[in-house]
Image: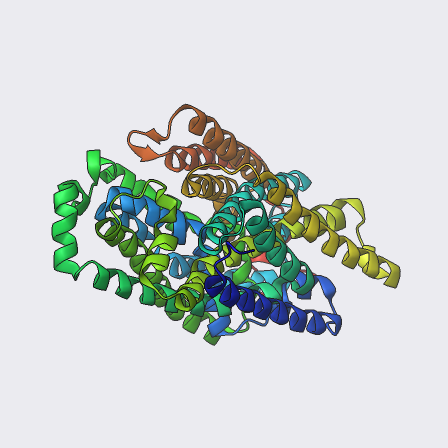
Amino acid sequence: MSGLNWGVLLPILVYLGVLYLVAARSNRLMTRSSSFLEEYFLGSRGMGAFVLGLTLVATYASGSSFLGGPGVAYKMGLGWVLLAMIQVPTALLTLGVLGKRFAILARRIGAVTLNDFLRARYESPWVVVLGAVAALVFFSAAMTAQFVAGGRLLQSVTGLPYGGALALFAGTVVLYTTVGGFRAVVLTDAVQGVVMLLGTLLLLGATVAAGGGIGHITATLRSIDPALLTPFGPGGFVSRPYILSFWVLVGFGVVGLPFSAVRCMGYRDSRSLHRGILLSTGVLAALMLGMHLAGVFGRAVLPDLTEVDRIIPELSLHLLPPVLAGLFLAGPLAAIMSTVDSQLILASAAVVKDLYLNYVAPGAEATPEGKARVKRLSLGCTALLGILPFLVAYDPPTIIVWINLFAFGGLEAAFLLPTVLGLYWKRANAPGALASMAVGMVSFVAIQQVTKRVLDMHVIVPSLALAAAAFVAVSLVTAPPKERVLHLFWGDRPLP
């Protein structure tokens, strides 16, 4: 205990306590809800603009954005900052492409998860089962990366051993997500979004001051390696095709991420949607620019860092008083928590809603005993699915940004085309969707095993191209969707 940095640890413990209080409040609201499933997995579709905007930002800005991304920027310079800024229109693209139409259809068909939408659109159990399996696999990989990031962060700044830090982080996230459900997730996301923004501005200002101003920092970086100041980085790492392919991976492709799509189901009204777009875009721009610039500028302040993922914690500990460092470090901690809690609640939904209630025990909620069983199953699945990646994270990998990008790419390969084409292309059918999901995921994983780039592009580009070709070709040579599906999705009202 004598080796603990209590000046940093105490503010973090207070912050974690606040998150649990939010979850406890959400749990009380859950007990009064008329529909447990809609409340637990979608917050009764009650998000206003402030919560919608910040939950999108907080969910998307993960440990990769606050630890892995600045770490790569430390190595690669301003070119990686340029690459990171591709993420700024994320909320605009998600809410703009899906937006009102997706929310209206979700309410019409009673969808609580993205797979509910796919089930109604394609009327295929295989599409839903494959989607649920994809969600579980890639969410598990993503949660493992986030748990590693959270454990490393707490270890480096508090003096806790890695196992204890990991247990504190994972235990907090699993507890408040299990207890409070979706409402706790989005409300804590809103709190964490504010913490992330304030922490980013504070650390960037401290880094610029410690480096002697931007002019002096620029001169120092030039003396280390002039390529750090170019758009393409040392060795031309950030090439033009790679930049363009990132517009797919972390730009338009995020429309296909289930945790982005489900937020398009859960906002309150059109006013919340429009204001949420503006708020989330502005906050995300500040976060991405501030954190990645801090990573680059940190090279001038701490030039000999070997573990680049530690640049943000090291800067905070070197430049800020302990209490302020603790308050600031709640920012990256918030980024990690706000991503993993969304992944966890959706992984649980994949088991309970998409598989159990659809195919194992349809109509289980029709009786009081069934409702109680579904509630116990939901809480138990959430806890269990949080414990499994926690156990895997005890043997952590090296640079978390690549694991996170792998999980993002896998989810996009599975869900992007069935979601967007299912929403806007009437000829899209179940065989086409199934072919797209299978080809997209298999090609993404297979190409990743062979190479990290194809024609100097990220592998998500050829994977989605192959998936799109399979979707269109198979849809056109098989039977079109049934008339009731077309009427449900494009008619004025569903059929009786």
Q: Judge by depth and name the residue closer to the eye, 108 or 410.
A: 410
Taking the image as shown, residue 27 lies to the left or right of residue 330, namely right
Closer to us: 283 or 95: 283
Q: Is residue 131 visible?
A: yes
Residue 101 vs 31, above or below: the answer is above
Q: Whole-percent x and y of residue 237? A: 25, 36
The answer to whether 22 is drawn above or below residue 248 in the figure is: below
Q: Is residue 35 left or right of residue 475?
A: right
Q: Residue at x 48, y 66 (%)?
A: 192
Residue at the limit of the structure toward the top, as seen here: 450
249 to 216, vertically: above or below: above
Q: Position of residue 450 (x, y in %)?
A: 41, 23
Residue 163 picture quarter: top right
In this view, which residue lies farthest toward the front? 2
Of residues 397 and 26, which is closer to you in this image? 397
Q: Quadrant of the N terminus?
A: bottom right
Left/right of residue 162 with respect to residue 331 in the rendered view: right
Image coords of residue 363 (percent x, y): 81, 55
Counting the numbered discs, the total is 0
Nearest the camera: 117 or 410?
410
Colour convention: rainbow
Where does the image place residue 492, in percent across and percent down from the top left? 57, 65
Which quarter of the rendering shows the C terminus? bottom right
Task: Evaluate whether residue 88 shows in this view.
Answer: no
**What residue is rendered at 42% in x and 49% in y?**
64
